[in-house]
Image (cartoon, rainbow, N blue to C red):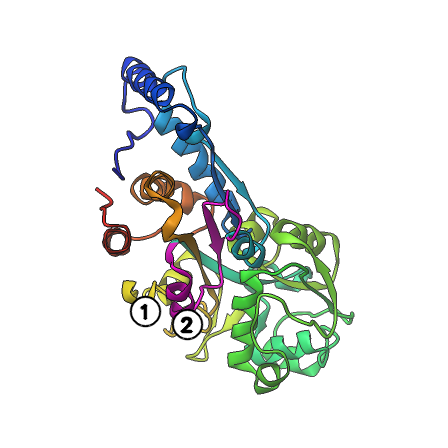
């Protein structure tokens, strides 16, 4: 039954030992049918830091202070990018994929999968120039699209100057950087550019892989953050928490209301609050170019996708992992720059689990 985990620190060593003993005896009785295996997932690099934290908390909760642990209390998560995660979901030993590019509801239904959000955040533009410190650099979606199209090539270009009349911009070429691998962050960023630039929408559109007209690429969020930090006069797009941890200057972007908004948790929440989450659509939503006067326009939502036919033991473990994260993992998510799932949304997700799997999250 989902939701039976004891939060770390609340149980006794003896209780953990008794639980471990019972599980050990059960496994012995069932033989190879109950062979212990870790929960296996792959996908989003955006959410990799918080999934890693939740995975350690899951094992600690299961162990409950005892000396015994088991491989099936562990999580083996590979941050290979959203596209690769979905592609690996077809492998027989894979339990779930994490993607920042939600699958259309029709595709989820056709494949016999379920899809639900587990964490949110922001995709931010970063610029490795002194003028961008403290969010002082302002860009519109249209100018940002022209930079990535190769039409605006220098920081001193009149289009950039017009948005930033009060800061000293370098007379230097813009070093355009982007993701090499199939990425949900790329999908969200490209969708914002598509909503802001008819030319971008016509020529490139939004996808997890883009045929970039200019610039250099790096693999994974961590690789792109490292390349940006090492490249003066560069511009890139990153997950907010990783950009902050890398010490990269953040860019204020223009939203639907015409306001230039600094990226920060409060402005992400302002945009995400407008989303109408619907389980019947497998929670599919568009988090690019969000409305609201105080909203940072480019938010990101990481979804977990898993097949319905995993079997109750395997599916229960995945839902157990993320049910624990919903109930006890919000503080860890916030500390790393993410926006956790609200209690109201968690309730909708658990109702969706009940409908999809015939069991509840309590």
Whole-angstrom CA distance, mark 1 to mark 2, is 8 Å
Where, quadrant-wise, is the C terminus in this rendering? top left
Residue farthest to the right, as pictured: 172
Q: Is residue 169 above or below residue 239?
A: below
94 or 242, which lies in front?
Answer: 94
Question: Residue 116: which quarter of the image?
Answer: bottom left
Q: Is residue 293 above or below residue 310?
A: below
Residue 37 lies within the magenta run: no
Question: Residue 48, percent across and down?
Answer: 52, 46
Q: Mark 2 sits on what residue?
A: 290
Q: Is residue 323 visible?
A: yes
Question: Residue 308, percent across and down?
Answer: 36, 52
48 or 311, which lies in front?
Answer: 311
Residue stretch rendered in magenta on the structure: 90-117
Q: Mark 1 sits on what residue?
A: 274
- The residue sitting at 58% across, 53% down in the picture is 243
Where, quadrant-wise, is the N terminus in this rendering? top left
- The residue sitting at 28% across, 29% down in the picture is 6
Residue 102 lies within the magenta run: yes
Give the side of residue 196 with respect to residue 339, left or right. Answer: right
Question: Residue 168, percent across and down?
Answer: 68, 69
């Amino acid at each position: 039954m989902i939701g039976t985990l004891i939060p770390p620190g609340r149980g006794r060593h003896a209780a953990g030992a008794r639980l471990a003993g019972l599980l050990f005896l059960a496994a012995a009785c069932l033989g190879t049918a109950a062979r212990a295996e870790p929960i296996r997932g792959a996908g989003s690099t955006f959410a990799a830091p918080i999934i890693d934290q939740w995975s350690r908390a899951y094992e600690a909760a299961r162990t409950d202070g005892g000396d015994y642990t088991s491989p099936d209390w562990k999580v083996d998560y590979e941050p290979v990018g959203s596209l690769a995660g979905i592609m690996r979901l077809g492998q027989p030993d894979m339990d779930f994929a994490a993607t920042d590019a939600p699958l259309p509801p029709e595709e989820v239904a056709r494949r016999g999968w379920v899809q639900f959000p587990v964490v949110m955040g922001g995709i931010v533009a970063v610029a490795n120039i002194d003028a961008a410190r403290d969010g002082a650099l302002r860009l519109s979606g249209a100018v940002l699209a022209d930079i990535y199209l190769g039409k605006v090539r220098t920081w001193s270009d009149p289009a950039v100057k017009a948005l930033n009349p009060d800061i000293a911009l370098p007379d230097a070429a813009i070093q355009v950087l982007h993701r090499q691998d199939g990425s949900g962050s790329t999908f969200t960023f490209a969708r914002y550019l598509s909503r802001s630039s008819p030319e971008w929408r016509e020529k490139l559109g939004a996808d997890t892989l883009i045929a970039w007209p200019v610039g250099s690429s790096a693999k994974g969020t961590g690789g792109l953050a490292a390349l940006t930090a090492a490249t003066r006069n560069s511009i890139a797009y990153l997950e907010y928490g990783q950009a902050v941890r890398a010490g990269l200057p953040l860019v204020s972007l223009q939203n639907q209301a015409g306001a230039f908004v600094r990226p920060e948790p409060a402005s992400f929440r302002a945009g995400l609050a407008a989303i109408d989450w619907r389980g019947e659509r497998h929670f599919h939503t568009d988090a690019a170019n969000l409305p609201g006067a105080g909203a940072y326009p480019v938010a990101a939502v990481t979804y977990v996708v898993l097949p319905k036919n995993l079997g109750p033991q395997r599916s229960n473990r995945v839902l157990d992992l993320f049910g624990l994260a919903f109930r006890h993992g919000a503080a860890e998510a916030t500390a790393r720059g993410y926006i956790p799932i609200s209690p109201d949304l968690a309730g909708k997700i658990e109702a969706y689990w009940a409908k999809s799997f015939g069991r509840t999250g309590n």
